[in-house]
């Protein structure tokens, strides 16, 4: 019986020593925070690239407004000018708004018709004059 009690006492002492040594020599765990940030950055960049590809595919669709948009971009006409040209084409009842870019007489006749149907203020007329110069001067 004494042998069993001495064995249990010895086992308990040894386990206590091991527990104390384990606490002193605990291994530090690696911090996974940088990997989380890297994964978040990869997901964000992938989403932005997918969105840009989707936008460019939608822009390249064959429709009446895509040609108009491409011509506005080619002539470096800003959003304000593009919207104004679009409203001129709508007021002039043009089937294809891109016909404004064909020749000066097309642009001028559409502007004349649009002036009868819509009221243009001085700022809009100045923008139209600037856009006309962008379109027809070399």
Image: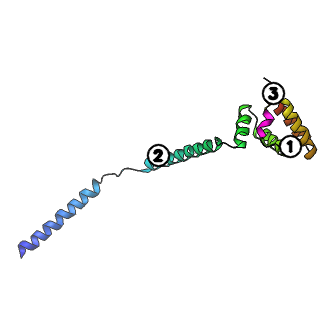
Q: Residue at x 35, y 52 (%)?
A: 29
Circle 3 crowding by C-alpha within 10 Å: few under 14, some 14–19, many from 20: few
Q: Earlier in the sequence, mark 1 or mark 2?
A: 2
Q: Position of residue 104 (x, y in %)?
A: 84, 30
Look at the numbered disc 1 and give the secondary structure of its residue: loop
Q: Main secondary structure of the magenta part?
A: helix
Q: Earlier in the sequence, mark 2 or mark 3?
A: 2
Give the alpha-carbon distance from disc 3 to disc 1, as whole Å. Answer: 20 Å
Look at the numbered disc 3 and give the secondary structure of its residue: helix
Disc 2: which residue: 38
Q: Residue at x 78, y 33 (%)?
A: 101
Disc 3: which residue: 136
| Quarter of the figure with residue 105 | top right
Residues drawn in magenta: 97-101
Disc 1: which residue: 92
Give the alpha-carbon distance from disc 1 to disc 2, as whole Å. Answer: 54 Å
Relative side of 101 to 30, left or right: right
Look at the numbered disc 2 and give the secondary structure of its residue: helix
CB under 8 Å between callouts 1 and 2?
no
Of badges 1 and 2, the one in the foreground is 1
């Amino acid at each position: 019986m004494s042998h069993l009690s001495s064995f249990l006492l010895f086992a308990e002492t040894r386990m206590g020593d091991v527990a104390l040594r384990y606490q002193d020599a605990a291994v530090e765990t690696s911090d996974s925070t940088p990997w989380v940030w890297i994964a978040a950055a990869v997901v964000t960049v992938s989403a932005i690239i997918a969105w840009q590809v989707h936008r460019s595919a939608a822009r390249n669709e064959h429709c009446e407004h895509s040609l108009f948009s491409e011509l506005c971009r080619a002539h470096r006409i800003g959003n304000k000018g593009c919207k104004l040209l679009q409203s001129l084409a709508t007021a002039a009842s043009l089937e294809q708004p891109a016909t404004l870019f064909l020749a000066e007489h097309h642009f001028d006749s559409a502007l004349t018709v649009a002036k009868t149907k819509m009221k243009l203020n001085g700022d809009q007329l100045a923008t139209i004059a600037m856009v006309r110069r962008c379109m027809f001067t070399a």
